Image: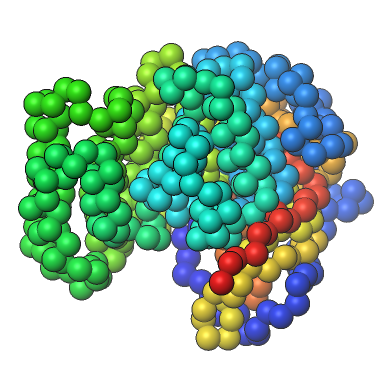
Amino acid sequence: MLKNTRKPVLFLSILPVITLVFLFSSCDHSQDKDITALQELNKNITQLPSVSPLQYKDEVFRKFDSYFENAQIIGLGEDSHGVKEFFELKQRIFKYLVENHNCRALGFEYGFRFQRSLEIENYITSRKGDLDSILSGLHWIHRNKEFRGLIEWMREYNSSLQKEDMIHFIGIDSQIDIWYLDELSQHFFQYDKDLYEFVSEILDTLSKWGKIDHQKLKQEEFQQIENLLISLKDKTLVFFSNHSNSGEDKMERDLLLHNIESHILSHENRYWMYKNKSLRDSHMAKHVLWLKEIVGNEAKVAVWAHNAHVANDPHYARDGSPAMGRYLREKLGDKYLVIGTGFTEGQFVAVTEDYFGEDTNPIIWKLNIFSPENSVNYLFCQADYKNFILDIKGISRTGNLYTYINKERPFFGVGDFYSATYPEIHFAEDRIINLATAYDMIFYFSDTRPITLIKKEP
């Protein structure tokens, strides 16, 4: 998740829980502080109930109904991929949006390429597949009880609905696994055998490229593959125009067409990343905007991703390009609502690097952070409430609190990776952000628990 390259860790992690202490100024109340900003913070925060976020009553969110009603897309951020409270909170917000604000779809980040997400989509809409088998092949960020609970709830919600009223799960990311033409061909075959025959020549030509090494791919080769994928989409559209009754419904067609589009975006993303041009966030935004178009004008879409991606941040990636949230804000204005999360102490799950520079298995880290005095965390951890909501949209633009957060400050964050040797990087680079413009509200927890991993089947 960080823009910098990973620094080597000089040990092999073997303990189930590791405690780390940052050598910065502590969050002790005896330290010097911005008294006026803290006073205003305490006046502007709402205490969160001391229960699991899954147990939050509707009243916790009802005061923000005007924000939800105005929004078309709602970004749900997490300050770490491995925190239980963040997963539970986002599931609870998503449930509230579905039940009260006509939210019809959830776009999911981190390695959830569009095509792979169709397994989840089929599970929750058509009751096809076995969730244990689906989860066993997923990354640890999805192979946990919290994520499983989200998917089970979505399936249960759909169980009594007609297809046109169901909610949907779609992958919006393509940074990890991108070239699965056998699955694409299978999708065509399952959708319509006549369509499969109609485009089989293009599929066969694509398959002859085999496993593509995008790092070594010449530009003319890149363009040849891109042209084939575009031709595949064009020919599929021709088939649809000549066979109006093909397939089950419009949603099935849209999913098939976007499967091709996702391959185009993935192909571009992987090719250009080796030339130090980041397309990942712009492509995630395209996926989300497509999803919004599919569910229709009256419905809303929620986006589940890391804080750094949902944020309205103009300079996120290594090459200085914007975060996904910036693209969405530029397209939608205030109809894109950004909800971030934060924490200061507690436990979370993440990998680190071993002595050989490889990722370890996921580790439960216990973190006691002594935040830098200029960080947002330093202010937040001194608040009257341990866990709270800060409504950034609702605070006075002329007050000291807004002045404090309306500048680039460190805001602690962890993705899937934690730098055990250089923890200070989690207050640096893309973790330095203008909170006032990046988010519309923050759910803050002073202490957290790790997600509950599901053992991967051999």
Q: Is residue 296 above or below residue 27?
A: above
Q: Quadrant of the C terminus?
A: bottom right
Q: Residue at x 62, y 46 (%)?
A: 148
Please state if 265 lies on the left or on the right of 422 as rendered: left
Depth check: give the residue in front, 114 or 328: 114
Please state if 202 lies on the left or on the right of 171 as rendered: left
User: Where is residue 456 drawn, in percent x and y?
Assistant: 60, 65
Evaluate whether residue 36 shows in this view: no
The quarter of the displayed image where residue 387 is located: top right
Q: Is residue 373 above or below residue 417?
A: above
Depth check: give the residue in front, 120 or 70: 120
Evaluate whether residue 446 shows in this view: yes
Q: Residue at x 71, y 31 (%)?
A: 390
Q: Is residue 1 above or below residue 294?
A: below
User: Where is residue 108 drawn, in percent x and y?
Assistant: 48, 43
Q: Is residue 352 above or below residue 278?
A: below
Q: Residue at x 57, y 33 (%)?
A: 154
User: Where is residue 166 drawn, in percent x and y?
Assistant: 48, 24
Q: Residue at x 39, y 57 (%)?
A: 175
Please state if 192 lies on the left or on the right of 59 as rendered: left
